[in-house]
Amino acid sequence: MSADSHSVKLINELVIAVYGAPGAANGARARYALTQALHALTRLSRSEQLMEMQRDAARAAGAASRREMRTALRRIASRAAAGQGQLPLALGASDGGAP
């Protein structure tokens, strides 16, 4: 299951807990408004989380301005795409085997 389906399931459960079974005729408009508000909150929290992650990555890279942050993030992404972030496998005396 994807994260979207988990959030949709949780939102549906919350709406049912507040307004009862979906078959009830009363509160259809309020049920829809609550559902849409919860979806909007989910999108907002995801975007805030992404912004915090970008800010933390920029701080870790030592970027002071927005331009430096974008440059640092681009550099990190290009290194990851090129596979340069992997360490070589070191075999030898450090693995506990005989020299």
Image (cartoon, rainbow, N blue to C red):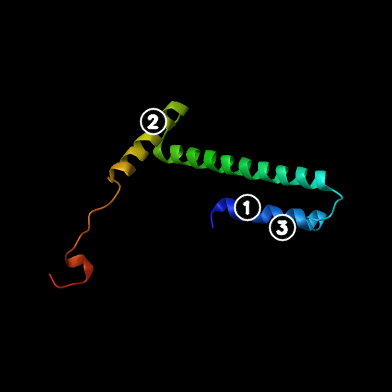
Q: Position of residue 73 (x, y in %)?
A: 40, 36
Q: Which residue is mark 3?
A: 13
Q: Amino acid at mark 1?
A: Ser
Is label 3 or label 2 in front? Answer: 3
Quarter of the image with the N terminus is bottom right
Q: Position of residue 30 (x, y in %)?
A: 81, 45
Viewed as shown, does residue 26 lie left or right of 4? right
Residue 47 placement: quadrant: top right
Q: Which residue is mark 2?
A: 71
Is label 2 or label 1 in front? Answer: 1
Q: Are marks 1 and 3 in contact (CB under 8 Å)?
A: no
Question: What is the total number of numbered labels drawn onto the structure image?
Answer: 3
Viewed as shown, does residue 75 lie left or right of 26? left
Task: Determine the residue located farthest toward the left in the rendered image.
Answer: 99
Q: Earlier in the sequence, mark 1 or mark 3?
A: 1
Q: Are marks 3 and 2 in contact (CB under 8 Å)?
A: no
The local crowd at label 1, few if under 14, some if 14 to 19, many if 20 or more residues have their Cα within 10 Å, is some
How far apart in space, not on screen, are marks 1 and 3 (Cα)?
Answer: 10 Å
Q: Which mark is residue 80?
A: none
Q: Which residue is mark 1?
A: 7
Q: Earlier in the sequence, mark 3 or mark 2?
A: 3
Q: Position of residue 36 (x, y in %)?
A: 71, 43
Viewed as shown, does residue 30 lie left or right of 76? right
Looking at the rendered structure, the secondary structure element under dot 1 is helix
How far apart in space, not on screen, are marks 3 and 2 (Cα)?
Answer: 43 Å
Task: Determine the residue located farthest toward the right in the rendered image.
Answer: 26
Looking at the rendered structure, the secondary structure element under dot 2 is helix
The residue at the point 73 percent across, 55 percent down is 14
Q: Amino acid at mark 2?
A: Thr
The residue at the point 58 percent across, 50 percent down is 4
Quarter of the image with the C terminus is bottom left
Q: Amino acid at mark 3?
A: Glu
